[in-house]
Image (cartoon, rainbow, N blue to C red):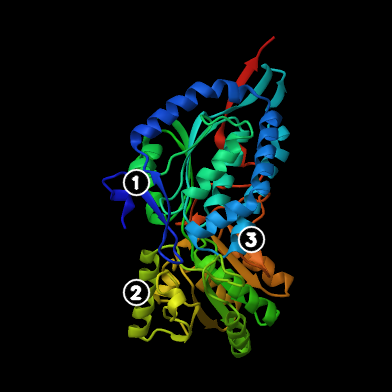
Amino acid sequence: MDTENDPRKIIEVINPADGSLIGTVPAGTAADVGAAVDDASGALAKWSSLLPRERGKKLFNAAAAIRKDKDRLAALLTSEQGKPLAESKNEIMGCANVLEYYASISGSITGEALPRSDYGYSFTIKKPLGVCGAIIPWNMPALIMAWKTGPALVAGNALIVKPATSTPLTCMEMASLIHGTGIPEEILRVIPGSGDEVGNAIAAHPKIRAVSFTGSTETGKIVEKAACGTGKHLTLELGGSDPMIVCDDAGIAAAAAGAAAGRFYNCGQTCTAVKRLYVFESIADEFMKALESAVTGIKIGNGLSPGVRMGPMSSSTGRERIEEIIDSVRNSGDGEITRGGRIPEGADYEKGFFYEPTIVAGVSGESRLMKEEVFGPVLPVSVVPGMNEAIEAANSTRYGLGASVWTKSIGRAVRAAEEIDAGIVWINRHLKIPPEVPFGGEKASGTGRENGIYAPERYMTEKTVIVSP
């Protein structure tokens, strides 16, 4: 059901494992955004006047509240998004980790002083921007909300959050817990609603000073256009088609397990998932056997069921796109589907949006699987002669979010880190990102960085004061 256009202005939240209705929330409007901006503007003076470490203490308390309620939040996240319960618990704990990290660095938010014999003294004061906005995707709603909430609030701003219409419940529950620890509702407001209505209002509002958006490259362009002329600070974490390169000196079993985990985590619906796999020719046969074995153990089902490692896709439209792509592969003959490639059979799968873990071997560089961002459980594999060809293929798309190289050679690792066009390059692992390190993309994968010690500065402005004797 297209709840975004529902004349009753109600968003229905559907469990993607069985199609059941798990909740409804009112759909926000542009007027709601305007009212939230006014409320935040009135509360900002008190919030921003707190010492940064006092704001940090409140974030620390918020993290503790989320940890305490992790089981309920994880079950809710699985019910609305579909991922296995273990993945949801990791995400909720990751959310708490992020808030704790920004609490820990809150005392590091300082200005600078510079004596000048010809001027006197100059001081640079860091000030919060004011009211900011965050637009959250459906695939990792809790974690990405924390990525944006932590630095914005610790820097002294107010934040208006728009969650995805398919996954608003966990974000709203997290906000409620955060409010209960002393952070005012006016300072953190969650407004569910459509991108056309609420998202556009956040991007275009002249009093919202910064927007951090995570989502597709195409939607990012819409956000950028809506914000044009408003002077906003923009952080855009957009799509990706992350390559993974397996060299001939890699640990085969570890690389195969890494590829399976990196592709099929969250049913392949992660921006930094392994989306293109390049294997050196000399080890291709051995690696493919190991990969098939690693994927064989992935149990599909309702994410709330014990032992499930891969839940459903988050929506019927997402699965339909995967079906269409796989049909085009079959029709073109560009690749051999060696595993999966269909909807699983059985009563347990009839009402949900399930799709089998799929491996496509022998894929050419011109295939849709290598050129587009495939957001689902499909892993295309291409065999390459060596490192030169692997790096060239890795850089052959418009994306540049993440990449990984699996090798025991320091020289190869350094070369890959330097030459691959990506915001993050992993060596002998893929996917996980600690809150201490900057994260973002190159090319069509976005602009700006989230996480790390400098993230609060993206929500601040500098004022210079020159004092002459």
Amino acid carrying mark 1 in the image:
Ile
Tell me what residue is drawn at x 58 percent, y 85 percent.
292
Say whether disc 2 or disc 1 marks the residue closer to the N-terminus: 1
Q: Is residue 373 visible?
A: yes
* Residue 163 falls left or right of residue 30: right
Q: Which residue lies under the disc numbered 3?
A: 432
Circles 2 and 1, Cβ within 8 Å, touching? The answer is no
Disc number for residue 182: none
Q: Is residue 250 visible?
A: no
Q: Which residue lies under the disc numbered 1?
A: 10
Tell me what residue is drawn at x 62 percent, y 47 percent.
451
Quarter assignment of residue 388: bottom right
Amino acid carrying mark 2 in the image:
Glu
Give neighbour class at mark 3: few <14, some 14-19, many 20+ (Cα, 10 Å).
Answer: few
Give neighbour class at mark 2: few <14, some 14-19, many 20+ (Cα, 10 Å).
Answer: few
Give the position of the C terminus as an image quadrant: top right
- Provide residue 251's location: percent of width, then percent of height: 71, 79
Relative height, residue 87 to residue 367 (above, below) = above
- Work out whether residue 429 or residue 313 is closer to the camera in this orientation and state it: 313
